[in-house]
Amino acid sequence: MAQKISNSVLKRLPVYLSYLKSLPEDAPENISATTLAAALNMGEVQVRKDLALVSDGGRPKIGYQRLGLVEDIEQFLGYDNTNDAVLIGAGKLGRALLGYSGFSEYGLNIVAAFDSDASVAGTDASGKPVLPLSALEDLCSRRKILIGILTVPAAAAQGVCDLLIRNGIKAIWNFAPTHLDVPPQILVQNENMATSLAVLSKHLSAQMKGY
Amino acid sequence: MAQKISNSVLKRLPVYLSYLKSLPEDAPENISATTLAAALNMGEVQVRKDLALVSDGGRPKIGYQRLGLVEDIEQFLGYDNTNDAVLIGAGKLGRALLGYSGFSEYGLNIVAAFDSDASVAGTDASGKPVLPLSALEDLCSRRKILIGILTVPAAAAQGVCDLLIRNGIKAIWNFAPTHLDVPPQILVQNENMATSLAVLSKHLSAQMKGY
DNA sequence: TAGATTGTTAATCGATTAACAATC
DNA sequence: TAGATTGTTAATCGATTAACAATC
């Protein structure tokens, strides 16, 4: 029976992963949950519980096999089988994401970008083609794309979102600062800057006031 | 006694705010928690509880005053008194953020960007100056900057982070995919793409498997 | 063996939801 | 008044933490 994984665990796993990968090649072969927890400022029980979900266990007194753990987390997160994605909205943010080479490491491959502005289309940004929106349908169905990355202005977001869904997209990574209405089986992951800013500035003003 | 606000509430407030602001000028003067909840796919009790924290209440049968609510949320989040910030790392992502005009709406003003690569420095990206890292100290102390936005490669992040803290920065918005070690009174808000991607691809593969 | 470390079971904590009373 | 809506109090749910037993 497939275990239900909470979002909070899911968000911590990449943190472990990137830390483990940042260690030098000649680091010790094993690493303990205690060490990991200390390095990342987390509770060690929590780390152990999280790791228990993805690996088949460490050894008392020794810890987890470092490289095995990396593999286990990557496999668990599905970073080993690459997902193709399309990106809509080739503005500054869109191009920044297009040019971000790090995604492949997480199993994400942006196949092409689309923009409603035909004059932007055709241009290559960091090797990836930028196409007119009219080409979306063909590409999505031909390559069975499941992930759409939305970097369009808020006002255009819902329309593009509907278009994506009509073309078989199952998951949307939404950078537009707006709420999207979607059918229940479609996943929307919001990457709302305003949200983080709120946390940031609130903490800041709280600290200033000294409470 | 200042109320302790949870992060989850803090993250929902900007969502209400942006929805309220997206309504047309001639929308009804009042809006009920019920309506808001339905539009955003949230629980109505939750909406009401959240709004209770920031406003002095709606009226039964009528709802909340729409414009008053906007003001209340903005004021609560501190969007009315602008915070100056510096951005370090004028790569693609850094420039995308620099050029993003929406921040001012959230009370954030990026004063300048810095980059260790002197050849990039001097260039203007969308009107904001890009300066060499050596100019950071002077500007931070002169303008009493409290927020630092980190868009440097992971390997450079901790070093720049330390530099920022030495220069009086109290809050760091970290886009580098790495953990930062900071003293307890410094706030780090991580904007880790890998984290969102993990949630996204996991849900996707779960759905494909049909469980 | 002793001590470090794992993994599990139980307790705590916090956030969400449900039920309901108050109000216009 | 009746019904929509607010706000509050209590119940539920889930995640984190603490305590502890098992293991190398």
Image (tube, coloured by chain):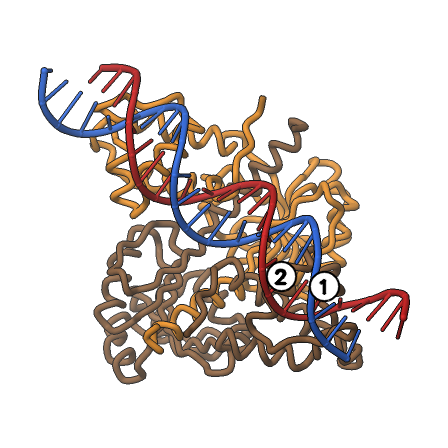
Chain colours: A orange, B brown, C blue, D red
Q: Is residue B74 above or below residue B192?
A: below
- Relative image position of residue B137 (x, y in whole percent): 24, 76
Chain ID, mark 1: A
**Label 1 secondary element:** helix
Q: Is residue B29 visible?
A: yes
Give the mark nearest the N terminus, 1 or 2.
Answer: 1
Q: CA distance from mark 1 to mark 2?
A: 9 Å
The N terminus of chain A is located in which quarter? top right
Per the image, the residue denoted by label 2 is A176
- Relative image position of residue B188 (x, y in whole percent): 36, 60
**Label 2 secondary element:** loop
Q: Quadrant of residue A177?
A: bottom right
What residue do we see at 45% from left, 78% from top? Answer: B109
Three-letter residue code for mark 2: Ala
A80 lies left or right of A137: left
Q: Are marks 1 and 2 in contact (CB under 8 Å)?
A: yes
Q: Label 2: how many residues lie within 10 Å, few (<14), some (14-19) or many (20+)?
A: many
Three-letter residue code for mark 1: Ala
Asked if badges 1 and 2 are on one and the same chain, I answer: yes
